[in-house]
Amino acid sequence: MMKKHFSYVSLRAQYQNDSADLFCSDQRFDPGFQAYRKQFHMPDPIILPGGTKALVDPGYAGVTEYVVNCIVVLRGAHGFKKFRLWGHNECAACGGVTDPAFYEAMLRKGGAILSAAIPNLEVELHFADFDGFYQIV
């Protein structure tokens, strides 16, 4: 038996969007992520502890394939061509590292994995710090 405990009105129609993001679950950056994402048309979020680290770390056995499969399924359903990988300063999953170069290297590795695994996917790399967001070019 189900008992309704929260009411809202949701869109019923299937939708297409322009992008998707892989974020860490660290809530310190969530207000900024939500504000940033409003500039895109209904981007799909994938939220995992460690974000991009979960994609690139060999210690997360099977997670790379899982993340790639999630992206493939979402892309098939919603048609996006752009995918943003995110890392953030002081990520607990990364041991709280404070060196942006560490996160840049991790993001570049993640970008290479996705570019090799998913043809024609435009991958952007982004770093969240406590004073703003940065795109790695």
Image (cartoon, helix red, strand yellow):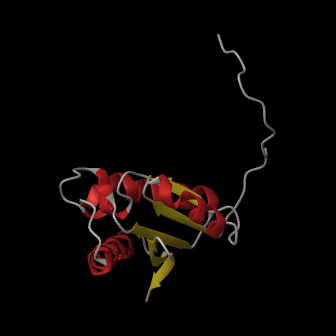
Which residue is at the front of the view, 117 or 48? 48
* Residue located at (49% from left, 57% from top): 28
- Furthest residue toward top: 1
Q: Position of residue 109 (x, y in %)?
A: 29, 75
Residue lying at the far bottom in this picture: please name it. 137
User: Is residue 114 depicted above or below 59 in this figure?
Assistant: below
Residue 60 vertical position relative to residue 32 in the rendered view, above or below: above
**Placement of the C terminus among the 4 image quadrants:** bottom left
Q: Residue at x 26, y 67 (%)?
A: 97
Q: Nearer the viewer, residue 77 or 110?
A: 110
- Name the side, left or right, on which 57 lies relative to 123: left
Quadrant in the picture for residue 5: top right
- Up-down relation of residue 18 to residue 53 (above or below): below
Q: State the image coordinates of residue 118 (x, y, percent, origin top left).
A: 41, 70
Most foreground residue, 80 or 137: 137
Task: Please indicate, yes or no, whether residue 103 appears anywhere in the rendered image.
Answer: yes
Count of numbered tags? 0
Spot occupied by residue 107 in the image (x, y as percentages of width and height): 34, 74
Q: Is residue 122 left or right of residue 109?
A: right
Q: Nearer the viewer, residue 128 or 98?
A: 98
Image quarter hosting the N terminus: top right
Q: Is any part of residue 64 visible from this angle?
A: no
Residue drawn at (28%, 62%) of the image? 96
Give the image quarter of residue 75: bottom right
